[in-house]
Amino acid sequence: MFALTMMSNDSTMHPHGFPNINLLSAPDSALNQWKPRFKNTADIPTSFYRNETVFVTMKRFQGTANSWLLRQAEYVGENTVGQAVWEMDAITSGKELVLKPFEVVSSFQVMPPKSAPICFERAVIGLGSQCGLGYCAENTPIEVYKAYRDQIQDYYMSSSTRWNEFVDHERRLYKTSAFSPMKCIDTARYYNFQRPTAGIEAGGEPEFRQSIRDPDASDPSAPPPNSSPVVAIIERRGTRSVINLDKLIEKVIAKGFRLKVMTYDQGCGIPQVAYMMRDVNILISPHGNALGGSLWMPDKPFPLVVSIDTTKYQESWFMMTTTVLAQRIIIHRCGPKHSTSLPAESTCPYVRDLNLARKYLKQLDWALDQDTAEDDLMALTGPEYPIELFDKYGGEKLHPFLTSYWKNLSRYVDTDRLMALLEQVRKENMQDADKSYLQVCEEGRCCGPICEGVLSRNVVGPLSAYGQKMNAANWGEHKSGGSDGQVGGYDWIETHPGQTLKNWVA
């Protein structure tokens, strides 16, 4: 089995060995702990040497265009078979070391040699417990996210010619593949971009916007983004699908918003996501990784991310990632329970999916009591927490089941309530042109009712992602204590007791 080895001719170096390293900015319980092993060069007669640096992080530690990357493990045991290739040529022309054969999906990935260790002049491993999530000891400054965004966009979208060359390459590469990173672009539907006509526009993205990094700035007939924001809706066709999506699309079109509807189900690479999000001001998607595409949204007007969750389930994960990007976020949950406006059952009927429930029962290897299995299944998938089943089976399997089931159910959108929010955001975009993100947060319009702690950490507290004033010497390194009018130790909960979004709730 391969392990990256630290080499030295100094036998006294690290006499007690290396500690476990958290490669990803994730809780210590996650399967991402890695322990380098140390060997003296005198003990290894043969090795493969690269006069380069192997990285998990790069720019912060002066990565070069030839540096190598290391993928220590795939995410939660999921393999990449059948997935489109996510190349990293915008970051490095080196190679990516992977440890499993199925992870070699292009010429960029390589397995380490079996005959001898592979040695690097330098290795930079781990992220220094830096991220926008609450379990990280330090925060990642906003400049780091923006630098990554700009590097990708500069590389692929420096000109229309450059983007078209990349697209031609991708089309040739995936010409016969059912799963292609170009699918999200090729299947996207556009509405209300052509003036003065409205409705769906045949042939995908209007020609006058294609291949252009900032299409509104290049189109003199385009309305100001503040007055006519571009809305993007991510459509999921498996789990977490929005049942009344067509109704939502109809209402967004009727209100005159420019709209693009896309799906990532058949593939979408990093450059393609960056391209699709480059002009989006409002992103609407079922909760999931698609919301991470907000990274590529323009800075102004302040972007809005709408996470569509189920009646019984919500997560604050993307509150953490959006607030370090100066973006607004709202969690939309259709009723009838746990909803601000308590909509009627006819607006948001409860969803039950017995097949989905059976899938997670099987995954958990949980066999219900044979005598009461059908009744127990109905209780598990009902609209109320099944307390009686907790008493019967305990929480060891009940809680993981409910989390997976509620999270992945299909869901409804309260279209009237969500459209009221979009109309309000359109007005606020005009009013917020000269405001800072901190001012918008002070007015209670950054995130939802459960995000006071998020704001304390990411926006105004000593771990704020803003005001770091980084230079070449400390680029990417978080420095505790904000600046630019932000006070270290500032506690949002203490200074804004009970503050929520009030009427700014979806």
Image: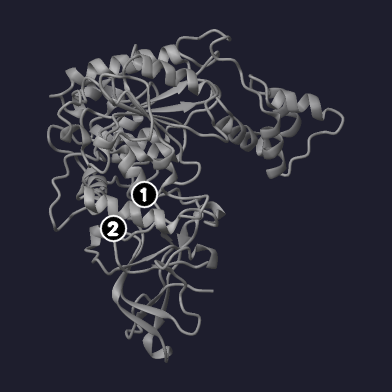
Sooner in the amino-acid sequence: mark 1 or mark 2: 2
Could you tell me the amino acid type at mark 1? Answer: Ile
Can you tell which quarter of the image residue 449 is in? top left
Could you tell me the amino acid type at mark 2? Answer: Ala
- What residue is pinned by disc 1? 270
* Residue 460 % position (x, y): 23, 32
Give the residue displayed 33% in from the left and 78% down from the top.
13
Tell me if residue 371 can be seen: yes
Tag 1's secondary structure?
Answer: helix
Within 10 Å of the Cα at label 2, are there few (<14), some (14-19), or many (20+) other Cα atoms?
A: some
Mark 1 near mark 2, Cβ–Cβ under 8 Å? yes
- Give residue 449's mark: none
Q: Is residue 448 above or below residue 4?
A: above
Q: Is residue 352 above or below residue 9?
A: above
Q: Is 159 left or right of 1, judged from the image as shown?
A: left
The image quadrant where one finds the C terminus is: top left
- Give residue 90's mark: 2
* Residue 113 % position (x, y): 47, 79
